[in-house]
Amino acid sequence: MREALHRLFRAARGAGVRISPAESIDAMKAVAAVGFADRGLLRDALLLTLAKSQDEKQALADCFDLFFSQHDIADTAAPEPITNDAAASVAPALHQADAPGEPPLGELAELLLSRDRASMAAAVAKATSAAQLSDIRYFTQRGIYSTRILDALGIARLRDDLDALTASRPAEAERLAVMLQGLRETISEMVAQALALYGREESENLRNEILRHAPLARLERRQVAEMKALIRAMARRLRERHSNPRKRKRRGHLDIRRTLRRNAGWGGVPFLTSWKRRHRDRPEIVALCDVSGSVAQVSDFFLLLLHSLHEVVDDVRSFAFSGHLIEVSDILDAQPPEQAMREILSKVGYGSSDYGGSLADFEKNWMKSITPKTTVIVLGDARTNNLDPRADILRRLSERAKRLVWLNPEGRMAWGFGDSEMPRYAAFCSVVRPCATARQLERAVSDIIAAYQ
Amino acid sequence: MNPQLPAASIDAVTSGLAAAGYIASRQIATAVYLAERIEKPILVEGPAGVGKTELAKALAAWRGLKLIRMQCYEGLDEAKALYEWKYAKQLLYTQILKDKLGEVLGGAETLTAALGRLHDFGDVFFSKEFVEPRPLLQALEQPGGCVLLVDEIDKSDAEFESLLLEILSDYQVSIPELGTVVATVKPLVILTSNGERDLSDALKRRCLHLHIGFPEQRLEERIVESRVPGISQTLRQQLVGFIHQLRTLDLKKLPSVSETIDWARVLVLLQANELDHATVKDTLNVLLKYEADIETALPQLTTFVAKAGRQGVFG
């Protein structure tokens, strides 16, 4: 049973419950205290020791139910008796098999014909553990694991028996074939469930890994939802990494007020000193996002990421532009992401982009909001449709701001070719980096936040 | 029951807590049972007023143990939570012992010799007599064991959590001048949190994580029965039914168990035998603590009262 628990832990890790070795030891102790007899109790005990939040409790409970429903399948693994008539006819048939002159049937055939559900279940469970079904990781392995289990059950011998019976007693052979079919179905169901249980972590990792490297601009529709989930996970990771920075070393000026108060007990003799701490600036970000044509999708993900970072970023102001530029911070804060993006696109989206005009819009209305603490991020492909790029505005912008970061969803190869004005803009940027994939996006945002710490 | 022994079964825990006036769900009873068996603290999370703190009180009452409560707040530090030196006493003693010190040191010829003699006395002023134990140290030093309640841990700073780790995992604290103080009898530790901020994984890992939500209808009826004995069965069912419907609304602060009990007491005082529209309307401010919530609930009252009334008849 300990073996089974370890498999459950592994499955739970796949489902997103973080279980450390120390916790699994605690869980084992708890299980030893409550015993295995009452499944509800076992479930409660595991939920108490392993899960550390409501979400994890839910995930673990689902995992637990799935895990034990799998074992229930093993209980019902033996095929159901078809009809009573068939059951009646099997008895004489078995007697015939014992008759002298006939070769005895194999173990599996006997088992199937005997309808002994308990020993059938035991045999299936044994074969399953022999085939190490819990090591299944990818959906492509379903076939091989089914085959392994059937082999372990003795399918080869059963086939011989089937051939022999077809010659001597066709009726019984037919019944055996039906039962074999049932067995196959049960086992493939078991394997599918095991995949859902144990393979989840790996296949999810694989899918996410592919997704992280996929170009954002060319995602398929069904991938967009998955990508949004990934972006949310990214935001959580960034928050965790940056929200609780280590305190700066205590040095510098003495905080006289606090020192006197702390040492009041000694009549003001300063045994314990307090030092003034340096205030750490939290990032102030102004983001200008191109929402024309192919860049719109990338901007969507970028804005979603930026606006999920409230805890670590003091102040984000977002602007969207293609032909002209508008502020979109309020739209993004007030509405759920999908709806907000739709509204933004309906206002400024999908036009042909005019970088010069949009920069002029920004200078006219919002240039004053840029302070030496602000990081300005421009996300766009810098394709100006041969209009005036107005790089002079970008120069003034970079002079006012702490940093000016340009994220370009096109690869470096394309910069400067055709109507791309990237080289001209790049001269005024602190950093220029490509951000075609989720991975690059995460790196870029992480670096921007880290620059403040 | 011998307080030193863990309860024999989960049912024993349930009945023990019930004897102390706390009706526990099976989850809660399992948590208490396991906490005693595998000697781990319980971290209780859940909305305000569902009986997180009550659990610790009931546990202490049932076990006949002392309850040591530490209310957490922002800025709580080890001087207030763990131990402090009695500075005044130290100063006073040095003054009183001045002559004695003079005697001891009087014979010494040189400064080095005087220092050497002083060293022979060791750290007299940093000994156990001069330590002022705060709740955490008190809990470890109780000879018969105790229930330690660390209330609203989410209100304290992240640094304080780290301070707790040693106590939670090993039931000991290290005082630099004295060495390590190990618990004589391991206390039952209960931490509560309202989820105002996320606690660190290191803390969570050391605890059994128990989430207490709003109780089911039957359980809540039993809680009211145990807390407000004077209430009639019909009224009890109607009242709990009404509150369960109220919780389905989108309110700023949902009424929790403590509000249910308060309301039951109010209704008993008003000598109401049945829930009717007028009484509910007049006493709604016991249940709902925001003006906006009352406004949300008012239009639904008639339906809720009618439904709750039917429950009283058939339930």
Image: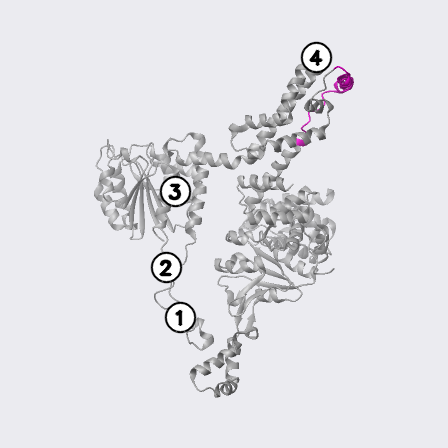
Viewer-proximal residue, B185 or A389?
B185
Q: Amino acid at mark 2?
A: His
- Looking at the rendered structure, the secondary structure element under dot 1 is helix
Q: Amino acid at mark 1?
A: Arg
Quickly name the residue at label 3. Answer: A442
Q: Which residues are magenta?
A: A73-101
For the point 55% across and 25% down, the residue is A143
Q: Amino acid at mark 4?
A: Pro
Q: Amino acid at mark 3?
A: Glu
Viewer-proximal residue, A292 or A179?
A179
Q: Residues within 10 Å of mark 2 (few under 14, many from 20)?
A: few
Q: Earlier in the sequence, mark 4 or mark 3?
A: 4
- Looking at the rendered structure, the secondary structure element under dot 3 is helix
Q: Position of residue A328 (x, y in %)?
A: 36, 42
Quickly name the residue at label 4. Answer: A170
Q: Which mark is residue A279?
A: 2
Q: CA distance from mark 4 to mark 1?
A: 100 Å
Mark whose residue sits in front, 4 or 1: 4
